[in-house]
Image (tube, coloured by chain):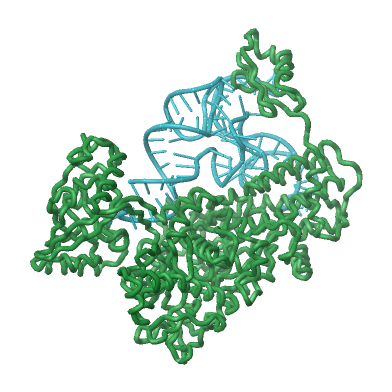
Chain colours: A green, B cyan
RNA sequence: GCUCAGGUGGUGGAAUAGGUAGACACGCAGGACUUAAAAUCCUGUGGGCAGCAAUGCCCGUACGGGUUCGAUUCCCGUCCCGAGCACCA
């Protein structure tokens, strides 16, 4: 019987579904292991071969862990709220729920076909009320808590109110927004609205005016990680800065913990580094400068990491959006400043980035007094200072900061060097090294000593204090969209109030259209009676990352309608042991999830401080596009090797009608009507296509659908081939060139068990050579899988099967464990073989550990013998021999004498089971 | 500009704590079976030199140095590709 993968795979997929083979219990005496994939957004295009890469790897690991005796939680679900479904709804009027359900169905079919061992009884969908109830619940909890810097955790807002009533806010060390100091008496005198406004500045989920990334084309605001180079990640539309009232999450309160706890995680260094950069901790000092506009005087605070350069300050710079601009613009300069601000405002974020190196600015007309030298320096306004970082104002030290230097050169401002012997004629000297000069009491100190010395001085003279700044911003949490979680918030006399928990979930209302209203309100304003007890409900919805921030907790206990996750379920599963997904979430989802997890941890709802212990970033699978070359103004196509003889146009051709870069001519003619009459200039009777590695996308005609691979080769071949392609973490183009080799392996594997249509598995004793082949594989496979080196594991399978074929192996003693070893990679074929051998219980795979223990390893080793590092011959010796014994044997060996050729041995280096080197 | 990860045959890639570089697979070439093809199987396949031959020798992991009996692996410098951040004071 031939290896009939279509029949086999259909049979076992049905069997697994019917027997609920992969459902997993929360109640088990086995140790737990939690393997998670980043759940997909179900897009209309379906899965392409790139998507399953990580899923196949996690499935292999899950199956492996089950074999090793773990109770494995391996769930899957859908990140179902999102922009594409809504954009589609706007265009077609089709409710996003309908398209989403349809896409999910398609995804499920595609995933089932690959033979994943997910426990589908635990599936979650972020757009279902039963799920988003808990997203809303968490939001209310964040609304009802504040972050206490003293205890380094979230605490109930009711406790804060008690403190305010007792002693005001003077001694409260909290993460907060703009608030003035007040006493207990003052607090008592405030009205409800004022109290509510103040508390809002402390809440972890809070509402406030902020400069946001506004995307006019999408009609919504976006988070920083949803914008790349001034363009929206989804859709690719320009983004501008706009001040708006928005819900936000005080992620910045957790900056220090998010940073510190990275050390405890088993993530790649590059990913941790990305998060460290995103959090962007910098230590420095805040300093107060007196600023004078005509006869008015103010104290202005700036932030610097280089307090030591205070003697070199020759001007100050404000961000154009800074509140100081209005206060410090002199009447004479008003016109020039207004003009500059207008220019700056007109530019989109993208233009500002593009003009990064173009120096612009305007003099405000005011002056600042250097608190150490009492020198008077001008205050300028320039785009190169960012409003959102530090205080939006800086002291400029052109000698030792490249940006200040460029500005000083452009506007002809003085430059005062502060480090002995530094050359600042061409560029600033930014390095933190050298001896200070021109710096009063700091003279002679090394820069590294001068920084703390300067800050000490500033602190003891009350002109500033030590300060740590983070680049991490609070997450903007409102979206002016329809297809997202509604906020469980209503406005009672203008005061934002959470719904009672019993009212959750607050379901997404019915609307007639999905566009914003004519007056610019979000789509929810179209809903009839969008109120609670007669009070208006919040009209914006939550962003995409809301639903994905805690989904891994929900899988632990997906049907629970009284808690996000029960205490028992959480204490059993704890957190994700292995998380596999793309690196594109490094500064989005992976920060928000860690924040969300830490918040719930602070409140005692869950027992682990970090959500994802180990994380692996699978590489992207790129497309491999093919090209044909049309001779200009004809319908004739010339093969790659001959195209230089003609003037041609390069045209993308569907990779599905190209095999090993050879074009299928008939399929090409049938592909599009305009090519029906195409003519070809061939080389050696074939049309050779050009190729390029590009992103896999419809427009490049390079999308390869996994269904098609399953159809032609089978799911097991697809699984093996995706792993064989190269290291998991590496990005690589999809190229079907090698898939035949992998498919050939599976057929060889099949033939090991079956000859001439019959199962040939005997009960004879295995030979030493057969046992050796198997043991090599067992040792290699365990080590490789633990290191996620799946590509080399597949190679080892091939080697072993080749060896056993040569040995004409037919004994159960070898073939039974071999099937088990291959099963995580190719589960369908191994189940079938297992069954045909007479083992009906597929669950018998659990015997794996016994098989490993039963066999002992080889006890001799073939040493390469080198002379001064050059390998000469091999020598087989028992592993149990001591180094001294080996040295003796080697010295006496006749081949040694031959290669010595009269020279004398200086020493013999023996590395057990590695090498023998003779130094002579 | 800063940070991180890389650079190995015609191709994808192996080499686990510094120990036989190129496993395995693709491709290519030759052969077996066949009327023929497909499928399958076998052999060869980094470069150079010598030899009828088995075989032997030399060079080779981006480039230049260093440490070592021995370096793809460790250290220093240069070049090149990729990713992330990008006026963060």
Q: If the image is split into quadrants, where does the C terminus of chain A sit? A: top right
Q: Which image quarter: residue A52?
A: bottom right
Q: Which image quarter: residue A208?
A: bottom left
Q: Report whether A359 appears left or right of B10.
A: left
Image position, residue A323 (x, y; %)? 23, 67
Identify whether A672 is placed above or below A856: below
Name the residue located 33 percent from the left edge and 71 percent from the top edge.
A183
Image position, residue A786 (x, y; %)? 65, 47
Name the residue located 39 percent from the left edge and 62 percent from the top edge.
A173
- The residue nearer to you, when weighing A216 against A611, is A611
Q: Inspect this view and state whether residue A669 appears.
A: no
Identify whether B1 is placed above or below A43: above
Report the residue that reaches farthest toward the right.
A763
Image position, residue A462 (x, y; %)? 24, 53
Q: Inspect this view and state whether residue A112 appears.
A: yes
- The residue nearer to you, when weighing A91 against A538, is A538
Q: If the image is split into quadrants, where does the N terminus of chain A sit? A: bottom right
Name the residue located 31 percent from the left edge and 72 percent from the top edge.
A243
Image position, residue B81 (x, y; %)? 43, 47
- The residue nearer to you, when weighing A517 against A772, is A517
- The residue nearer to you, when weighing A704 against A96, is A96
Report the residue that reaches farthest toward the left.
A332
């Amino acid at each position: 019987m031939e290896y009939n993968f279509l029949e086999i795979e259909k049979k076992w997929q049905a069997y697994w579904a019917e027997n609920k083979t992969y459902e997993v219990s929360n109640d088990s005496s086995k140790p737990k292991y939690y393997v998670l994939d980043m759940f997909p957004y179900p897009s209309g295009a379906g899965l392409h071969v790139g998507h399953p890469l990580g899923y196949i790897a996690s499935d292999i690991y899950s199956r492996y862990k089950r074999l090793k005796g773990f109770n494995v939680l391996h769930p899957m679900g859908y990140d179902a709220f999102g922009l594409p479904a809504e954009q589609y709804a706007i265009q077609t009027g089709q409710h996003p729920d309908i398209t989403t359900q349809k896409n999910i169905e398609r995804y499920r079919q595609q995933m089932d076909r690959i033979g994943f061992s997910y426990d589908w009884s635990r599936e979650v969908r972020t757009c279902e009320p039963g799920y988003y109830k808990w997203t809303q619940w968490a939001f209310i909890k964040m609304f009802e808590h504040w972050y206490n810097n003293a205890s380094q955790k979230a605490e109930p807002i009711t406790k804060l109110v008690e403190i305010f009533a007792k002693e005001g806010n003077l001694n409260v060390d909290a993460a907060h927004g703009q608030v003035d100091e007040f006493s207990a008496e003052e607090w008592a005198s405030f009205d409800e609205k004022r109290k509510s406004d103040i508390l809002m500045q402390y809440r972890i989920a809070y509402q406030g005016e902020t400069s946001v990334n506004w995307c006019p084309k999408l009609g919504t605001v976006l988070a920083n990680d949803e914008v790349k180079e001034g363009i929206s990640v989804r859709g690719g539309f320009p983004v501008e800065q706009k001040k708006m009232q928005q819900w936000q999450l005080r992620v910045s309160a957790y900056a220090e913990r998010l940073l510190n706890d990275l050390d405890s995680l088993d993530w790649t260094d590059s990913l941790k580094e990305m998060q460290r950069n995103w959090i962007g901790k910098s230590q420095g000092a805040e300093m107060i400068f007196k600023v004078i506009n005509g006869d008015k005087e103010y104290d202005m605070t700036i932030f610097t990491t280089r307090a030591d350069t205070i003697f070199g300050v020759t001007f100050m710079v404000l961000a154009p959006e800074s509140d100081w601009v209005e206060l410090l613009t002199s009447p004479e300069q008003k016109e020039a400043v207004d003009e500059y601000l207008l220019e700056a405002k007109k530019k989109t974020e993208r233009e500002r980035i593009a003009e990064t190196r173009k120096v612009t600015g305007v003099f405000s007309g005011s002056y600042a007094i250097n608190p150490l030298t009492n020198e008077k320096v001008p205050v300028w306004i320039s785009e190169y200072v960012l409003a959102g970082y530090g205080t939006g104002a800086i002291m400029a030290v052109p000698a030792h900061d490249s940006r200040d230097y460029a500005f000083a050169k452009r506007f002809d401002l003085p430059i005062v060097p502060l480090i002995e012997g530094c050359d600042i004629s061409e560029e600033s000297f930014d390095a933190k090294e050298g001896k200070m000069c021109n710096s009063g009491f700091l003279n002679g100190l090394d820069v590294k000593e001068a920084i703390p010395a300067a800050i000490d001085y500033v602190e003891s003279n009350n002109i500033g204090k030590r300060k740590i700044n983070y680049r991490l911003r609070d997450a903007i949490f409102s979206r002016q969209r329809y297809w997202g979680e509604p906020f469980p918030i209503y406005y009672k006399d203008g005061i934002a109030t959470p719904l009672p928990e019993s009212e959750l979930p607050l379901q997404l209302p019915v609307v007639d259209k999905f566009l914003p209203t004519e007056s610019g309100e979000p789509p929810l304003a179209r809903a009839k009676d969008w109120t609670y007890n007669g009070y208006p409900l919040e009209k914006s919805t939550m962003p995409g990352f809301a639903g994905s921030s805690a989904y891994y907790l929900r899988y632990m206990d997906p049907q629970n309608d009284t808690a996000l996750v029960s205490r028992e379920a959480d204490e059993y599963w704890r957190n994700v042991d292995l998380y596999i997904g793309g690196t594109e979430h490094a500064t989005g989802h992976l920060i928000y999830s860690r924040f969300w997890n830490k918040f719930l941890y602070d409140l005692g709802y869950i027992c682990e401080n970090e959500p994802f212990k180990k994380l692996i970033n699978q590489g992207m699978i790129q497309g491999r596009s093919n090209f044909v070359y049309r001779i200009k103004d004809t319908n004739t196509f010339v093969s790659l090797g001959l195209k230089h003889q003609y003037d041609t146009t390069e045209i993308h051709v569907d990779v599905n009608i190209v095999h090993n870069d050879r074009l299928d001519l008939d399929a090409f003619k049938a592909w599009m009507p305009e090519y029906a009459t195409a003519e070809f200039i061939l080389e050696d009777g074939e049309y050779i296509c050009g190729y390029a590695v590009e992103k896999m996308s419809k427009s490049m005609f390079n999308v390869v659908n996994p269904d098609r691979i399953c159809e032609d080769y089978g799911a097991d071949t697809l699984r093996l081939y995706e792993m064989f392609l190269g290291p998991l973490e590496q990005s690589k183009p999809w190229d079907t060139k090698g898939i035949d080799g992998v498919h050939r392996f599976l057929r060889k594997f099949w033939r090991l068990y079956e000859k001439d249509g019959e199962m040939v598995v005997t009960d004879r004793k295995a030979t030493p050579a057969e046992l050796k082949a198997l043991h090599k594989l067992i040792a290699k496979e365990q080590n490789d899988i633990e290191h996620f080196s799946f590509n080399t594991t597949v190679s080892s399978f091939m080697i072993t099967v080749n060896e056993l074929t040569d040995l004409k192996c037919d004994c159960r003693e070898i073939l039974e464990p071999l099937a088990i070893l291959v099963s995580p990679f190719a589960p369908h074929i191994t189940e079938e073989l297992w069954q045909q051998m007479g083992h009906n219980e597929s669950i018998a795979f659990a015997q794996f550990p016994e098989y490993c223990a039963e066999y002992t390893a080889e006890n001799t080793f073939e040493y390469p013998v080198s002379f001064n590092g050059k390998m000469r011959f091999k020598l087989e010796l028992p592993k149990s021999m001591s180094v001294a014994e080996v040295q003796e044997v080697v010295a006496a060996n006749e081949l040694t004498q031959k290669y010595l050729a009269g020279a004398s041995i200086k020493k013999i280096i023996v590395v057990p089971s590695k090498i023998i080197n003779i130094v002579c």
